[in-house]
Image (cartoon, rainbow, N blue to C red):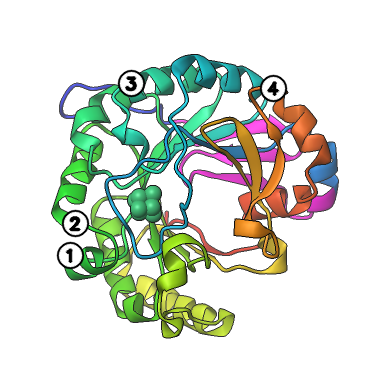
Amino acid sequence: MTDLGLPTVPKQTHTELGGDIGYALTGQHFTIGEGVDVASVAATLAHPLSVIVQVTKRCDMDCGFCSETMQKPDPTLRQLATMEENLRGVIRVFLSGGEPLLRRDFIDIVDMYSEHHIVAVPTNATHGLQHAKGMAGKVAYANIGLEGPRATVLRVRGDYDKEMKGVRAFQEAGIPLALSSVVYRSTLSALPFTIQIADVLDATKVKFILPLRKGNALKLPEHEFISQTEAEDAFTRLKEARAEHMWAPALRLTTWTPQNEGHMIVIEPDGFAQAWPVYDAPDLWEPLGNVLQEPISAIWERYRFKENHVSKYVGRSIHAVPRAA
Ligand code: SF4
């Protein structure tokens, strides 16, 4: 129980999922045996390891890097229930947006999905105060988008103080936290502070991600996009700073390489499943099918990025440093 007497996620550290795959609850990532071949694991899976369900496209922020372009009506609870039934067999579902916590019925959706899946919630946390207690004990972790300290967040994302109030509400409710930071050239100097913030919050990990050229990011000045080499150099410096300051959170760096292409499966509010990001596809989406009409296993069968999917989620196609003991 937390200080507020709320239930916490059980202190289980690892779950074996069969077929050489496991899930590390402490680091919130999938695991695979050291010598195990990703291609053969991908070939034996009948379902994706992880999908993203957009419970809304709406958002109360307007981040400079946001890739959302098209508005679609929110799915009803009945539609979300049909999608959930068709997603059975998927280990982890991100209940995402837009900003998912804008939905007043968000806890009903969490209840619906947490019975059959590990649920994680990517959020800007501005509505954390309303939903934290209802999420406690059901959500494996909240993944907070945060690009650094106040001035950086105000410039690239929005209201830092409102966001941090929500983050503190999650923390008080005992919900495990992770941070995600989109990296611009002009935010490189803020990245060590992001890790410091994560360490103070006892977050499991900090994920650094380069922006994709879609939506608002098309308006970013060219100099804000760093190269693969610059990203790797920055990550090396962050690893050194992490060791020097004894920061505990795991670090991840996702850059956009052929090995990461199409690795995510995003379910839009109208049920359409899309492989994302597919570099030469219109809007970076590749249509896969619709989970209001067919089970995810049928979509998975014709999905051409299975190996990239597994490789990313077991940490083979990204730069990763594990959480300090
Ligand atoms: S990146 Fe996320 S928080 Fe920012 S505007 Fe887009 S949906 Fe909202």
* Of the image marks 2 and 4, the number of the one nearer the N terminus: 2
Residue 293 tag number: 4
* Of the image marks 3 and 1, the number of the one nearer the N terminus: 3
Q: Which residue is tagged 3?
A: 105
Q: In front: mark 3 or mark 1?
A: 3
106 inside magenta stretch: no
Span of residues in magenta: 12-39
Residue nearest the observer in this picture, 204 or 283: 283
Residue nearest the observer in this picture, 104 or 190: 104
Q: Quadrant of the C terminus?
A: bottom left
Q: Residue flagged by tag 1: what amino acid is it?
A: Arg
The residue shown at (61%, 68%) is 256
Q: Which residue is tagged 1?
A: 150
* Of the image marks 3 and 2, the number of the one nearer the N terminus: 3
Secondary-structure class at tag 3: loop
Q: In front: mark 2 or mark 4?
A: 4
